[in-house]
Image (cartoon, rainbow, N blue to C red):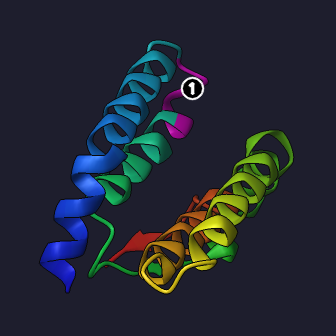
Amino acid sequence: MRLLGNIIWFLFGGFIASILWVILGILLAVTIIGIPFASQCFKFAELVLTPFGKDTELNIDKHPIANILWAILIGWEMAIGYVTIAAFFAITIIGIPFALQWIKLAKLALFPFGAKIK
């Protein structure tokens, strides 16, 4: 299931989403202030490329100030968007595995600093 899910995910948007995250990370890395945010964009790019079989381990206490800033400025909008997409996928039985991947992205979208992708 993991291989098939990753292939379907990759073909129907995972590759494009990953490239967009990499481009955003490169743009943020141009500024000194944006470098920590750029590293989080690269983390998203890795997970969005092939999310099946990977899990996220959140560690909010590792960088609390950065996580709070991210959650206020960017994170809550991304998390709501990912949960909304997950709700649309969860309507059908076939879409439930993809909905679970969107929920995984929503967790990472809210507090990415200190999170690890396994």
Q: Please give the name of the residue rendered at 47% of the width and 25% of the height, measured from the top-left corner.
A: 24
> From what the image shows, is residue 25 above or below residue 7?
above
Q: Which residues are magenta?
A: 32-37
Residue 65 is situated, as x and y percent measured from the top left of the image, at: 78, 55
Q: Please give the name of the residue rendered at 60% of the width and 78% of the height, measured from the top-left corner.
A: 90
Residue 75 is situated, as x and y percent measured from the top left of the image, at: 73, 51
Q: Which residue is mark 1?
A: 34
Residue 83 is situated, as x and y percent measured from the top left of the image, at: 70, 65
Q: Residues within 10 Å of mark 1 (few under 14, many from 20)?
A: some
Residue 82 part of the magenta-drawn span: no
> From what the image shows, is residue 17 above or below residue 12?
above
Which of the pair 45/39 is nearer the observer? Answer: 45
Outermost residue, front side: 92
Count the marks: how many? 1
Q: Please give the name of the residue rendered at 47% of the width and 34% of the height, measured from the top-left corner.
A: 38
Which of the pair 64/1 is nearer the observer? Answer: 1
Amino acid type indicated by mark 1: Gly
Which of the pair 61/117 is nearer the observer? Answer: 117
Q: Quadrant of residue 48?
A: bottom left
Q: Please give the name of the residue rendered at 69% of the width and 71% of the height, measured from the top-left corner.
A: 87
Horizontally, residue 24 falls left or right of residue 71, namely left
Secondary structure beneath label 1: loop
> From what the image shows, is residue 74 above or below residue 47?
above
Quarter of the figure with the N terminus: bottom left
Residue 114 is situated, as x and y percent measured from the top left of the image, at: 53, 66
Horizontally, residue 76 falls left or right of residue 33, namely right
> From what the image shows, is residue 92 above or below residue 113?
below
Horizontally, residue 29 falls left or right of residue 22, namely right
Q: Quadrant of residue 61?
A: bottom right
Quarter of the figure with the C terminus: bottom left
Horizontally, residue 59 falls left or right of residue 93, namely right
